[in-house]
Amino acid sequence: KNEVEQSPQNLTAQEGEFITINCSYSVGISALHWLQQHPGGGIVSLFMLSSGKKKHGRLIATINIQEKHSSLHITASHPRDSAVYICAGPMYSGGGADGLTFGKGTHLIIQP
Amino acid sequence: DTEVTQTPKHLVMGMTNKKSLKCEQHMGHRAMYWYKQKAKKPPELMFVYSYEKLSINESVPSRFSPECPNSSLLNLHLHALQPEDSALYLCASSQTKRTGVDIQYFGAGTRLSVL
């Protein structure tokens, strides 16, 4: 099974700060997912990436395949960005039938 | 429509009850998933269905019984649960079962309490 490690587990920052969340993974992951979970429980997919960099609004995700590392950045952070951010990858290598295996999540709080 | 609908939102059941969780999507997705999430923990995969057939069972106890009656609907039948089964149960769907290719769309979850 693939494994996903994420850091930090908790992060508190002031509004406007640049936020970075890191994720490392074991061999066999063909694409990495970044997800957001709000206190109500619902999970939203932010990015799926297998190479390079993707940007959506103030969110940027990067991945380095050789180093098996991905980062999620939030620019000009805002209190509404407060949520749990989770990285996840395919549970099994091989690209066949699969579910996701998740990192432990980063609980982000942005203070006004 | 990118919505995955789960019902009920909350469920309280006794250890001798039988209940069912329901998940529905109308995006034409052919893969559907059940995940279990305990408080302050990440979700854990329970089952994967692909084209209405069970593809993965992650060694889930038989008191959880999944069913996929058609491509839009996924059920989780619950029987003789234990208090430690109390958790948020999340349903997800994706175009195919290849999580290296397809994004998963999640429902809001059913918060289950077993007394």
Image (spheres, helix red, strand yellow):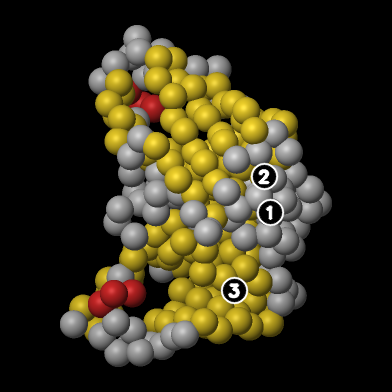
Whether tag 1 and tag 3 are in contact, CB under 8 A, the answer is: no
Q: Position of residue A83 (x, y in %)?
A: 34, 65
Which residue is depicted at the point 55% across and 46% down?
B25
Label 3, on which residue? A70
Q: CA distance from mark 1 to mark 3?
A: 24 Å
Label 2, on which residue? B31
Give the left or right position of residue A101, taking residue A11 as reference.
right
Label 1 packing within 10 angstroms: few (<14), some (14-19), many (20+)? some
The amino acid marked with disc number 2 is: Ala
Given residues B83 and A4, the one toward you in this image is: B83
Chain letter for mark 1, please. Answer: B
The amino acid marked with disc number 1 is: Gln
Q: How many numbered dots are placed on residues in this image?
A: 3
Whether tag 1 and tag 2 are in contact, CB under 8 A, the answer is: yes
Which residue is depicted at the point 35% across and 89% down?
A76
Whether tag 3 and tag 2 are in contact, CB under 8 A, the answer is: no
Secondary structure under tag 1 reads loop
Q: The C terminus of chain B lies in which quarter of the figure?
A: top left
Which residue is depicted at the point 72% across and 51% down?
B96
Label 1, on which residue? B95
Secondary structure under tag 3 reads strand
Q: CA distance from mark 1 to mark 2?
A: 6 Å
Q: Position of residue B86 (x, y in %)?
A: 34, 30
